[in-house]
Amino acid sequence: KRGPEKLEVAEPPNRLPGLAPLLPTDPALYSGPFPFYRRPSELGCFSLDEQRQYHGDARALRYYSPPPTNGQGPNFDLGDGYPDRYQPRDEAIQERLDHLLRWLLEHRGQLEGGPGWLAGAIVTWRGHLTKLLTTPYERQEGWQLAATRFQGTLYLSEVETPAARAQRLSRPPFLREFMYMGYKFEQYMCADKPGSSPDPSGEVNTNVAFCSVLRSRLGNHPLLFSGEVDCIDPKAPSPQPPTCYVELKTSKEMHSAGQWRSFYRHKLLKWWAQSFLLGVPNVVAGFRNPEGFVCSLKTFPTMRMFEYVRNDHDGWNPSVCMNFCAAFLSFAQNTVVQDDPRLVHLFSWEPGGPVTVSEHRDAPHAFLPMWYVEAMTQ
Ligand code: A3P
Ligand code: MG
Ligand code: MG
């Protein structure tokens, strides 16, 4: 099925007289049929270790190991080990696309899709695409995406907004502990080797990550992106990545119909967008009580999440998310015309408004590292 071409291209983009073009984000503008999205296929992977060092292998991949289902449910203390057994990643270090670029540099000779495929592709993180997917419904947090065209390829790299930076620097202690708890849940649910059991006695080090690198296509936009994967299910029906991957999430225990409704409208949208893009079929949620213990688990199949909001007037629609993303990618492709690794088009969005663009050269916005540009120019 082909996507709605008329929605994909903001052509001609909305333009205030004499000003740069704008891309609107109202959901009503993007409610056409679901666009084409190629089943994501894994091209490779890499790992980041305890010191955040890159390794071109799957050493950081963990194995899904849920507790036995013998009567009593789980009783995971998500506060255990905080803060003494916590090594948080230094969020002040902006890694931009660097790890993904290293993978790409080392594998550019072996990419499928034929010669020239990369030159027509968009390279980014899955997390950046997730933000695009949820934009038509987002009412709280804006974003900024830096875009550079180099040897044909369009690179998209998120820039931390001033508001996000201010929030990060003034994050209250309770929020720091909530962040820890999400990772602690992973430790209770994952083993280091297939067939072994989780070991919650160790440290939680959020430098460690396993990243899958995938190829897909949205409408006529070939995509190469990478996303962090929580674990692989050794018992998955198909051992082929990404269908054997599992996404783990925590959420507050819910007691009223209103709490569930709000969960479906807001959290499930983010969970769906993140896992759908990468082709992860299941999200396993741990619900924590006010004392910070997970006492129940529930599996949400990614392809069934929309059912919870299908009949909700204030729900979300996957077509809107994907059509908006396709429209943004067309908007970016049409805006970033000049091929120049030092040139950046900065796309900015705040809730309630359209996406705007500004142009920048070199520091601080240029994000393709010299080692990458030079190696690619050889
Ligand atoms: P939860 O989502 O279970 O709360 P991910 O789910 O994407 O694998 O991320 C793992 C954990 O990282 C999250 O667990 C959360 O604790 C933390 N985290 C991820 N993104 C975050 C964000 N934008 N703000 C705060 N914490 C975040
Ligand atoms: Mg994760
Ligand atoms: Mg997770």
Image (spheres, rainbow, N blue to C red):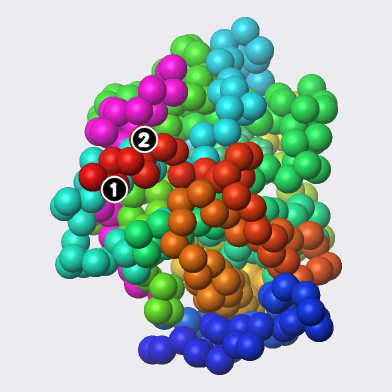
Q: Is residue 232 visible?
A: no
Q: Total number of numbered labels?
A: 2
Identity, as a three-letter code, of the amino acid under mark 2: Trp
Residue 47 lies, in percent from the top left, at: 34, 32
Span of residues in magenta: 37-64
Q: CA distance from mark 1 to mark 2?
A: 10 Å
Q: Residues within 10 Å of mark 2 (few under 14, many from 20)?
A: few
Q: Residues within 10 Å of mark 1 (few under 14, many from 20)?
A: few
Identity, as a three-letter code, of the amino acid under mark 1: Thr
Q: Is residue 220 left or right of residue 298?
A: left
Residue 53 inside the magenta-drawn segment: yes
The residue nearer to you, when weighing 207 against 63, is: 207
Residue 86 inside the magenta-drawn segment: no
Cβ atoms under marks 1 and 2 closer than 8 Å: no
Q: Which residue is mark 1?
A: 377
Q: Is residue 166 visible?
A: yes
Q: Residue at x 65, y 15 (%)?
A: 82
The kind of secondary structure element at disc 2 is helix
Residue 188 lies, in percent from the top left, at: 48, 27
**Which comes before the other along the chain, label 1 or label 2?**
2
Q: Is residue 349 left or right of residue 124?
A: right
Q: Which residue is mark 2?
A: 371
Q: Residue at x 49, y 65 (%)?
A: 338
